[in-house]
Amino acid sequence: MRKRIPTLRTMAALLGMAASMTAMGQNPIVGHLFTADPTARVFGNKVYLYPSHDIVAPEGQRQDWFCMADYHVFSSENLCDWTDHGVILSQENVPWGKPDGYSMWAPDCVCKDGKYYFYFPNAPKNGRGFAVGVATADRPEGPFDCEPQPIKGVMGIDPCALIDDDGTAYLYWSGMGIRGARLNANMKELDGEGRQMEGLPDGFKEGPFAFKRGGWYYLTFPWVRKDKGTETLAYAMSKSPLGPWNFKGIFMAEHDNGCWTNHHSFMEYKGQWYLFYHRNYYSPNMDKRRSACIERVSFNADGTIKEVKQTLRGVGIRPATEKIEIDRYSTASQNAHAEYLDTTNCFEGWYACLPAKDSWVGFSDVDFGPVANAYLVVRARAMENTAFCIRENSAKGKVIARCTLTVKSDNGRFRRDMSNQWITLTAPLEYVPKGVSNVVVSCKGEGVDVDWIQFKNRPKYFSSTTPGQDAAKPDEQGFIRRWMLLEPIHCDIRSNVVFTDTYLRDAFARNYFSNQQTILPKNGQKVKAGKQTLTWHALDSENYNVKLFRFADLLKKQTYGVLFWAVTTIDSPCDMTNVRLAAGSNGASMWWLNGEEALLLSGDRRMVEDDGVSPRLTLRKGRNVLRCAVINGPGLSDFCVRFIDENGKPVTNLEIKSEK
């Protein structure tokens, strides 16, 4: 997974940028800065993420400890694409806090009566330890106004707010254990003293997150269950928001890489519950710089939480037409694994290593719905020439595409060695899955490393038309885009230098198919041209120039050494005298209006607007039939045509019909 992101030296310049970056999904979910202690909330139809922001400690600060100077907020509608709305609060803007305390630890945000309340810890200017403040805003992304004083009676970190069904709000925090209290109606003061939460296990606990589901209150928290251990995520349940609590156990085990902390939140979105947590993915050698991740959550019938396993894949449906970071795999063969692209800058991401034949990785929930006339693009590298496949659902599933990666070649005097260098290659698709499916990359030769894959749609050159469709108009510049196009006729043409007037008149006068100068074809109608059986296609060109080469290529027909025929019907509201036909073509072309030759473009042409202009013509009131033939050898055939008046202005008050 390769990301074009700023280095740590330039991150400071980004702190004031609002809604200017979109971070792409999978775990971790944000790829351009550290995002620890993620609190997720649903406001309206979006998810908003309020994490703390680990940074590299500046000179003079403790280098082996947490360092946080501000808060960002992110939003998403699909849990894959996250928009960074920029800094919402920084330590310099907290009236009661130390402007150089670097102690902006885990926050929370809730909404009540249309107002957003952002709770955060910070080191106070006067005294020791931590206090908890509140800032308010009219929108979830701010701007937030900070209260002049912290909340009285709250000394600690990691605030979490819960608004009950009746509108009563509660605040939880960690400080000498986990504590909780009811909030006043103004959401800025405690309604009474905070009290210790009872029924929780012994051992270090912090970072409470409380939520309600199905009549149960849940108090969840990081907990160190072993001597000299690291944090798990644990929980207790109660029928009361302040307990007493019945401890239920853990729902996420310790990190397998030794990262000491974990911090989390729960959220229900579109009928599914999710767990947000953090891990030091982008800082493997320093666990005080963490990144937010997401997993799906399930509950047992009695309300208890099923254990959640950490994954690379995370959540969300990935469009096949966007880059699929295959290194964030869902499943893998025993010998497949992910490696950092650049160990000096882990924000560059990872790649999937498939070390041997039959190694594979699988990526779940890929949406092939947007795929249309696509091909595969892959970024990969290898030490030796190799091959690999993209399959559906399993390592033995249906082949979507086959890739051959040639890194070493020897063609006489010309030798190439691209071993262990990243190469972007393409491959045609043999099959396109329907809807949402899983993809598997499997190695079929020597080992291969894969950074990402993408199913890339070719540009749309044409749209199909139907007989009952409303008539088209020329575009604003007068170019005619609606045509009946005949599949290309094979011609033995080695060079376009032969396209003299004499050659072309002879070529266009030949009878290639029946009634070629009088036919008004219908969509799907077939004709015989020598040994070829060809089909007419009713199409609207997406471009002012009708790309005949792409038309042939889309149909997998011959694209060079070909003759194209095109017909369209033009309805004029009146007799228009003294108009001219202005055309351009790549390859030579001839044009006929109502059965009479109007224009010949000879020679080895390149498509230029109004490359040739006819003598004065008359467009009759009612139906007019325009035909053209374009012939080309080794060129990319296309044409453009319009009618212009005596002043050279385009004629646009026409109706164009491909079939009558």
Image: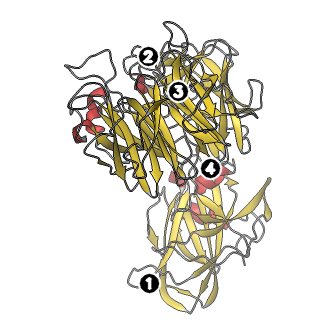
Which quadrant of the rendered structure holds the C terminus? bottom right
Tags 2 and 1 in contact by the CB under 8 Å rule? no
Q: CA distance from mark 2 to mark 1?
A: 71 Å
Q: Which residue is mark 1?
A: 645
Q: CA distance from mark 1 to mark 4?
A: 35 Å
Q: Compare residues 534 and 359 and report the one nearer the observer.
A: 359
Q: CA distance from mark 2 to mark 3?
A: 24 Å
Look at discs 3 and 4 and give the one toward the viewer.
3
Q: Compare residues 583 and 314 and report the one nearer the observer.
A: 314
Crowding around mark 4 (Cα neighbors within 10 Å: few <14, some 14 to 19, many 20+) is: many
Q: In the rendering, which numbered label is found on residue 221?
A: 3
Q: Which residue is mark 4?
A: 561
Q: Which residue is mark 2?
A: 284
Considering only vertical position in the picture, is 136 above or below 28? Answer: below
Q: CA distance from mark 3 to mark 4?
A: 72 Å
Residue at 69% from the left image edge and 47% from the top image edge: 556
Q: Quadrant of residue 486?
A: bottom right
Give the secondary structure at mark 4: loop
Q: Can you give x and y, in whole percent of width and height, for residue 106 in the image?
A: 40, 32
User: What's the residue type where badge 4 is placed?
Assistant: Gly
Q: Can you give x and y, in whole percent of width and height, for residue 516 in the image?
A: 72, 69
